Amino acid sequence: MAKNVQTLLHSASPYAGFDGKRMSYDPQGWESGHPVFAQEIERLAPGLIVEVGTWKGASALHMGKLVQHLGVDCEIVCVDSFLGSVEHWMTPQGRSELNLEFGHPQLYYQFLFNVLHDGLEDIITPFACTSTHAAKVLAHHSIQCDLAYIDAGHEYRDVLTDIEHYWPLVRDGGVMIGDDFSNNWPGVMRAAREFSDTNGLPLNIYDYKWVLRKD
Ligand SMILES: C[S@@+](CC[C@H](N)C(=O)[O-])C[C@H]1O[C@@H](n2cnc3c(N)ncnc32)[C@H](O)[C@@H]1O
């Protein structure tokens, strides 16, 4: 399998030597197996997917299994601070999901464990970084992806910034998908609509997923 971005980011496999002895499989996610992923992955047969916002990996695992099933030679780069979003720090329930150890979320290790559990380490490349910094690094390397999935911070400014930073990284003919186009997340709706209107791009909604195609 091609692991082009992994070789740019990591001098050794980020999975090497990880045992995760104290962990168990926990692929918690939200609408992570939505049919829009199969629809776009079957259509595009992507060589590179960039996911912005990974959490414990559920959506990346779903996409990884799809490309594996289709026999597509694809790398999935998972950009996440692995520190959680605003909402995870606001309530005791949210904080408990971060699984803090010495005050630090253990999301990254849970994600590594989940990827190894599903045998997708040859497809999924972790990029533990803020979305803004990661976009700069990927642009620096002239990376172009077939599919960008935007599911990191859900505040208006965060979403708009992610869309603006990752849209240039989507190749012509590729697609950007985003999560949570819903009244529960007005910032997501505002940012997706604003970018679509400003750039004259049709915004397609499939049951809470928003989709912009780069034709
Ligand atoms: C909704 S979760 C992602 C869920 C995942 N796509 C799934 O379906 O399983 C949002 C993630 O975005 C990450 N995140 C939030 N703001 C970020 C930022 N500015 N840079 C990088 N990651 C960020 C959080 O750490 C969190 O893991």
Image (spheres, rainbow, N blue to C red):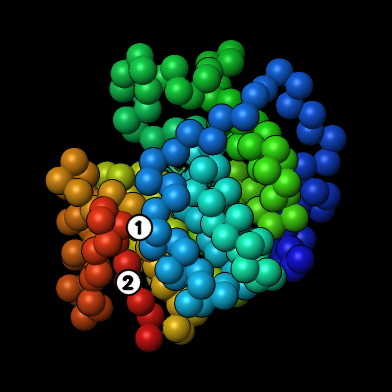
Q: Position of residue 41 (x, y in %)?
A: 50, 69
Q: Earlier in the sequence, mark 1 or mark 2?
A: 1
Q: Position of residue 49 (x, y in %)?
A: 55, 64
Residue name at image x 33 percent, y 52 percent? 179
Q: Is residue 160 above or below residue 212?
A: above
Residue name at image x 81 percent, y 53 percent? 11
Q: Nearer the viewer, residue 86 or 181?
A: 181
Q: Position of residue 123 (x, y in %)?
A: 69, 57
| Residue 48 falls in image quadrant | bottom right
Q: Quadrant of the C terminus?
A: bottom left
Report the residue marked by disc 2: 212
Q: Is residue 197 left or right of residue 63?
A: left
Q: Is residue 88 left or right of residue 129?
A: left
Q: Is residue 136 above or below residue 93?
A: below
| Residue 138 falls in image quadrant | bottom right
Q: Position of residue 114 (x, y in %)?
A: 64, 37
Residue name at image x 68 percent, y 43 percent? 118
Dividing the image into four quarters, tell me where ligand 1 lies.
top left
Report the residue marked by disc 1: 178
Q: Nearer the viewer, residue 113 or 13?
A: 113
